[in-house]
Image: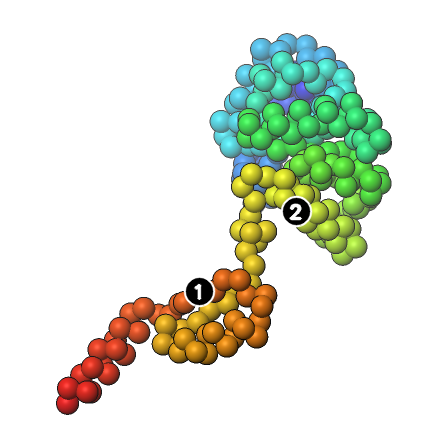
Amino acid sequence: MNSNIIHDKKFRKGFTKCRLKEYGLNSDNIIFEITERVAVIDRDTFLSSIHHYKNQNYGIAIDDVGAGYSGLNFIANVRPDLIKLDMNLVRDIDKDETKQLLCKAMVDFGKNAGILLIAEGIETEDELRTLIQLNVDLGQGYFLGIPQESFQDITPDRAGLIVKYHTKNNAWKYRNSVYPIIGHLAKPGYTFSPREKAEKIYETLRLHSVITEFTVIEDVVGYYIRKWLDRDNKDN
């Protein structure tokens, strides 16, 4: 919505609640998307209105960040739930290092401030791949799907691309981390029962030179119960 809508004479107090009741919705279902392509006439009144809606659990998104008047001060004052990166920042981001740095800065800011970042206007696979590599939370654009009258699921081929690039991104991130995931450290092991004869273990190791270590495991409680039963049977 235009940030100056609160000055419209048709903007009535209680209008939003009435409309929500009409459609059986509540404030948790609604996100106000604010665009600042025009300057705010009365910033104090505008921010007061924003905080009024936030206190009623409405979501707030700032649209077209990187265009118009959506500056850092505005973001800091509104404290939105979502930030939408303007499509001009997204366009050809895979070829523009400066745009990538700006996007990364916004991603880091969002992570620390608890704000989700949405990239607008994704039109190529390379843009999608780069945005995923930069850890942008969400995206929209013709490459992912054109606007529809009703909500539609993303097509399987586009969903597959997202999964593929997320998988590659996570694999790269964990390989280069001081604390990788356990899957990158784990490897198949060899185990023996504590009741296994040493002769058999020796023969197994002799025939399989790739085994450099092994583990002796068993249900310890069960092992000692069976041992106790064996001893009891011998006594009888």
Q: Is residue 1 visible?
A: no
Residue nearest the viewer, comparing 143 with 61: 143
Q: Determine whether, in the image, residue 93 is placed left or right of residue 210.
A: right
List the single residue furthest toward the bottom: 236
What label sits on residue 106 in the rendered view? Answer: none
Mark 1 against mark 2, which lies toward the viewer? Answer: 1
Question: Residue 152, relative to residue 69: is it above or below?
Answer: below
What label sits on residue 215 in the rendered view? Answer: 1
Q: Determine whether, in the image, residue 119 is placed left or right of residue 92.
A: left
Q: Which residue is mark 2?
A: 171
Residue 180: quarter of image: top right
How far across and down, in percent of the image, does residue 86 sit? 76, 27
Residue 4: quarter of image: top right
Which residue corresponds to the image point at 35% horizontal and 70% vertical from the top-left?
Answer: 219
Circles 1, 2 touching at the beta carbon (< 8 Å): no
Residue nearest the viewer, comparing 150 with 37: 37
How far across and down, in percent of the image, does residue 233 sit? 20, 87
Which residue corresponds to the image point at 26% horizontal and 73% vertical from the top-left?
Answer: 224
Residue 23: quarter of image: top right
Q: Is residue 92 visible?
A: yes
Quadrant assignment for the N terminus: top right
How far across and down, in percent of the image, does residue 123 sit? 84, 39
Quadrant assignment for the C terminus: bottom left
Which residue corresponds to the image point at 43% horizontal and 78% vertical from the top-left?
Answer: 199
Q: Identity of the amino acid at label 2?
A: Ala
**Upstream in sequence: badge 1 or badge 2:** 2
Question: Residue 126, relative to residue 47: is it above or below?
Answer: below
Check disc 2 and report its element: helix, strand or loop.
helix
Q: Residues within 10 Å of mark 1 (few under 14, many from 20)?
A: few
Q: Identity of the amino acid at label 1?
A: Thr
